[in-house]
Image (spheres, grey):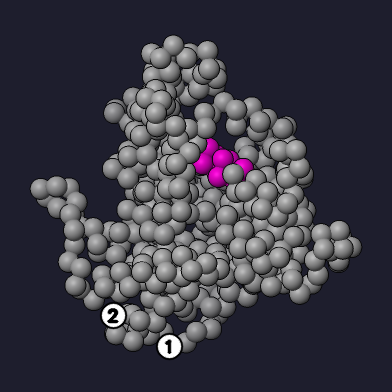
Amino acid sequence: MDRYFGFKEHGTNYRRESIAGLTTFLSMAYILFVNPMILADAGMDLGAVFTATALAAAIGTMIMGVVAKYPIALAPGMGLNAFFAYSVVLGLGIDWQVALFGVFISGIIFILITVFKVREIIINAIPAELKYAAAAGIGLFIAFIGLKGAGIIVPDEATAVGLGDLLTGPTLIAIFGIIITVVLLVRGFNGGIFYGMVATALLGMITGVIDTPDRVVGAVPSLAPTFLEAFRIDWGSVFTVQLLVVVLTFLFVDFFDTAGTLYAVANQAGFVKDNKLPRAGKALLADSSATSIGALLGTSTTTAYVESASGVAAGGRTGFTSVVTSVLFLVALFFSPLLAVVTEQVTAPALIVVGILMASSLGLIDWKKFEVAVPAFVTIVTMPLTSSIATGIAMGFILYPITMLAKGRGKEIHPIMYVLFFVFLAYFGFLSE
């Protein structure tokens, strides 16, 4: 085992790799409870999504560890689950089964572009500013969902949204959770988001705001309500422009999120040499395979987690770290009764903090160039204001060629961007019918 993963070569051992795997798991364990809550809003079975989330994370992370040999864990991604539930299912009125099929297809496409090595072409076609804007916009959207769930932001007839009653029990619990989570992360605690959720849930139970579960360990929830539901659909609803845009959005967000995460974590671990990532093809193949597998199980897009950096910081240098994390996700399957205490107030701090972390890409946008600032800004603000990630991306992609041509920088625009310009124009035309 140590020879296969190259312990001696990377200066590590079983103990260090195991601690790193545990650290990574604790840093991202919150997804086990947050993902089911988000997808349940789309009408999916809470228990089945919990099981699908744990299995998708375990399988994807195991593939990453054994095949790509990277200390990087995978799980259903934040932002992509919000897009799935609130933009696709609730916003566009697409059945969640059809949305799962869209996730499955995006994973297959991802596999193909990885095998045929065309990912570099796609990466170069999309300007960096729009990639950063998409990440920041998704962060604001997620944070907005968290603020609404906490009761801090409420509907207002005069101003669309307004400040809620901050003195109600559930809202106070959420505010407490936000503060605790922020303090833990500022202090550098690995797993701060997870521990923040635990502290919030405990306070909620102590104060009677949240009902105490009758047990902690229980049987694994049935996967039947979501398993292979991606293929139990009305096939006439599949071949539409609307679903095509959904698939492209799943692919776009997952593609660049994964590429950025892989590079960042691998660079921290010292794997990047001459600006190249060894075994990048295998790592991307593991990610794309996990996306399709997760869709079959019954969850939104599975992707690489930047929280894996916490495991690297703890000494993880090989795929054995991922193997340990994978096994822990399997063990977590038996703790489904804890879902009862994970209310909107408990998940709100996690959503808000993840939104803050994603918004950090705002600083990478060159705001001094107005031709870049306009499409980036519209992409960012449109997502939370329309509750649609796809709409934000579409509007940004439409504006970008216009502003660049007006500036006289048309030669810098990749031909693929012109194609996407007309695709998204057709998308809006379709929505208006």
On the image, the x and y values in percent for residue 302 come to: 57, 53
Amino acid at pointer 2? Val
Which contiguous range is marked in magenta? 251-259
Depth order, front residue of 338/24: 24
Asked whether 258 falls inside the magenta stretch, the response is: yes
The residue that label 2 is drawn on is: 209
Among the two numbered marks 1 and 2 on one chain, the one whose residue lies closer to the N terminus: 2
Depth order, front residue of 153/409: 409
**Image quarter of the N terminus:** bottom right
The residue that label 1 is drawn on is: 214
Q: Quarter of the image holding residue 53?
A: bottom right
Q: Is residue 359 visible?
A: yes
Q: Residue at x 54, y 56 (%)?
A: 76
Depth order, front residue of 166/363: 363
As measured in the structure, the alpha-carbon distance from the residue carrying label 1 to the one carrying label 2 is 16 Å
Q: Is residue 280 left or right of residue 420?
A: right
On the image, the x and y values in percent for residue 105 come to: 57, 41
Q: Residue furthest left?
A: 158
